[in-house]
Amino acid sequence: MKLFIDSNHLSPYAMSAFVALREKAIPFELALVDLQRGEHLAAGYAGVSSTLRVPTLSHDGFNLSESSAICEYMEEAFPATPIYPANVQDRARAREIQAWLRSDLMPIRSERTTEVVCLRTP
């Protein structure tokens, strides 16, 4: 399994997918994509990511982009360690918080990248 992320570790979306994989204890490797150099627009990456964005997950020949889709896929493909609550309202609240974290924390993201999360692996 491979998770394609921004080489500068700035993406909260990549962090979300990274944390989901780590919480589920699923082995994976990181593939860094240099967005500033336009690597996400290269033909090779277009074969992996239908949206040309990060994160993208590659799992057994199946490629999936967009962090929320990746998290939900991981939840269904690897149900042994759930990352979302069982109760439908609690699960909705968790997804609400997840969406807020992805979209509304620019001041914090500007001050601190996600590098410390994505690079510190056991």
Image (tube, helix red, strand yellow):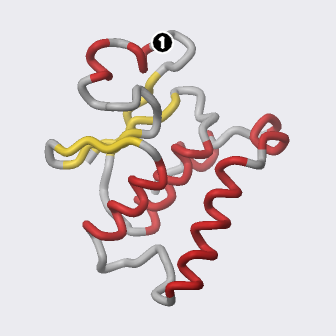
Near-viewer residue (81 or 40): 40
User: How crowded is the residue under tag 1: few (<14 C-alpha within 10 Å), some, or many (20+)?
Assistant: few
Near-viewer residue (99 or 54): 99
Is 119 drawn above or below residue 39 in the view shown? Answer: below
Q: Amino acid at mark 1?
A: Gly
Provide residue 5's location: percent of width, then percent of height.
46, 35
Is 71 drawn above or below residue 95 in the view shown? Answer: above
Q: In the image, is 63 to the left or to the right of 97?
A: left
Q: In the image, is 28 to the left or to the right of 120?
A: left
Q: Seen from this angle, which residue lies furthest left?
A: 61
Provide residue 96's location: percent of width, then percent of height.
64, 67
Q: Is label 1 in a helix, a strand or a loop?
A: loop
Residue 25 sits in quarter: bottom left
Provide residue 86's location: percent of width, then percent of height.
46, 87
Residue 61 sits in quarter: top left
- Identified at 30% across, 22% down, the residue is 46
Tag 1 residue: 38
- Identified at 46% across, 74% down, the residue is 83
Q: In the image, is 56 to the left or to the right of 67?
A: left
